[in-house]
Image (cartoon, grey):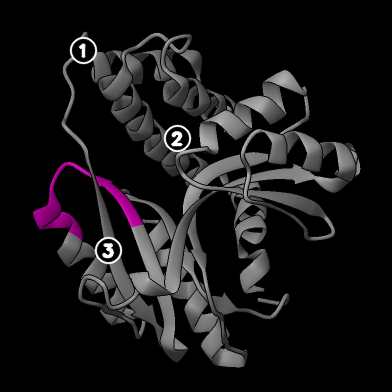
Amino acid sequence: MAGHSHWAKIKRAKGATDAKRGKVWSKIARKLIIAARGGGGDPAQNLNLRYTIEEAKAANMHKDTIANAIKKGTGELGGENYEAAVYEAYAPGGVALMIDCLTNNRARTAPDLRAILDKNGGNLANSGAVSFQFTKVGIITIKSDLVDEEKLMEVALDAGADDVKNLGEVYEVITSPVSFHKVKEAISTAAGLPVEAAEVTYLPSTSVTVEGDVAAKVMKIIDALEDNEDVQSVSHNADLPETV
């Protein structure tokens, strides 16, 4: 399921409990702060902010919460400074992990991640030990029953996408990080096609097959990492059974 792990992650997120949903809102709020700080608080002039607001609305965040996060980013309200950090790690079975974080305290984040990994049979890796197995890409997900494949391919490739993958239940449009916003704009706004999810993430070049108890341990460690407030997302190269 390495090739389907992105869609699997989306489905898990959509089925999150209320407690999990609150943590998702907290993570998106940090993204809103970063986006507003980097490009201003007007979504018409700040594409990154506009898409993050869309993500927040899709997660049913309250308007006031969104507005306050933007104001923290622009300096209208007092707020903490968050910075991006990426950690590399291994899970059981030799599964490689890329852990994207937004943190206001690296001195807290690294030990917290190390404790989660150690407790669940994983370990932090040195910089570069894992990242060579991944490529940073934009992934735009569209449900296959809502779009015509030929039209999607035409729009996406004309806008600069690298590839369109048919995964059965969904199509995944793959872009470079630089082309991500342009391609998403072409698909969702210009062509009016319904986008299920979109993010810049890490795509593995190879996969590691894990089964049984090892597969369960891998999912446990991913869940524990994603539960941490500093962690935005976890990418992996595990080929997992559908039952897990």
Q: Which residue is mark 1?
A: 77
Q: Secondary structure at mark 2?
A: helix
Q: Secondary structure at mark 1?
A: loop
Please tell me which residue is depicted at 35% across the width and 61% down the height of the picture.
Answer: 99
- C-alpha separation, residue under disc 3 versus residue under disc 1: 30 Å
Q: Say few, some or many: other residues with alpha carbon within 10 Å of mark 1 (under 14 / 14 to 19 / 20 or more).
A: few
194 displayed left or right of 44: right
Q: How many marks?
A: 3
- Please state the extent of the stretch shown in magenta in the rendering: 100-109
- C-alpha separation, residue under disc 3 versus residue under disc 2: 22 Å
Q: Is residue 40 above or below residue 212?
A: above
Circle nearer the N terminus (3, 2): 2
Q: Is residue 205 above or below residue 102?
A: below
Give the residue type at disc 2.
Trp
Q: Which residue is mark 3?
A: 87
Q: Secondary structure at mark 3?
A: strand
Q: Quadrant of residue 131?
A: bottom left
Q: Position of residue 41 (x, y in %)?
A: 35, 11
Whether the residues at callouts 2 and 1 have beta carbons within 8 Å, the answer is: no
Q: Which residue is mark 2?
A: 25
Q: Position of residue 77 (x, y in %)?
A: 21, 12
